[in-house]
Amino acid sequence: MIILRIPFLPAAGMALYPFILVKTAALKTNKRIINHEHIHLRQQLELLIVPFYILYLLNYLLALLYYMDHNKAYFNIVFEREAYTNEKNYDYLKHRKFWDWIRYFSPRYQSGL
Ligand SMILES: [Zn+2]
């Protein structure tokens, strides 16, 4: 995996297949953030990249209509629910099943933030 430092990145980290982008050099060694972004790379790969971004944006827009709040909408995107739920589980990707993000539509993973 290739990690690039992008100082003007609007977030601490971002996955843009096949790259992980981070805002600062220190974040390159932040295990949790790198694992979070690695989960997104897996989601992107199994959705053949472009459909991932379309689904991500659609999910965000629908969540924004539902919650009327950017942060709640963001944390409730199914791909973010999966990544935040498992970002501290460093073996997660070793055991994760194909398209496992689907499970995160379940209300039990809803972020109340
Ligand atoms: Zn994320």
Image: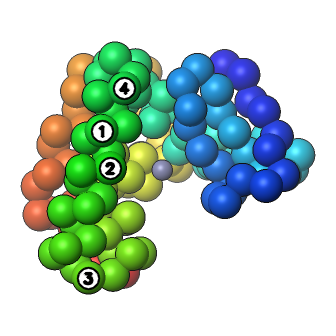
Question: Amino acid under label 2?
Answer: Leu
N-term mark: 3 or 4: 4
Secondary structure type for disc 3: loop
User: Residue 93: x percent and y percent?
Assistant: 43, 27
C-beta proximity under 8 Å, tags 4 and 1: yes
Can residue 11 be seen by looking at this rendering?
Answer: yes
Determine whether the beta carbon of the residue marked 1 sits less than 8 angstroms from the nearest atom of ligand 1: no
Circle 1 SS class: helix
Choose top left, top right, bottom left or bottom right for residue 90: top right
- Per the image, the residue denoted by label 4 is 50
- Within-10-Å neighbours for mark 3: few <14, some 14–19, many 20+: few
Quick check: 61 left or right of 108?
right
Instruction: Determine if residue 35 is in view.
Output: no
In this rendering, the answer to whether 86 lies above or below 18 is: below
Identify residue for label 2.
Answer: 57
Cα distance in 3D space between marks 3 and 4: 26 Å
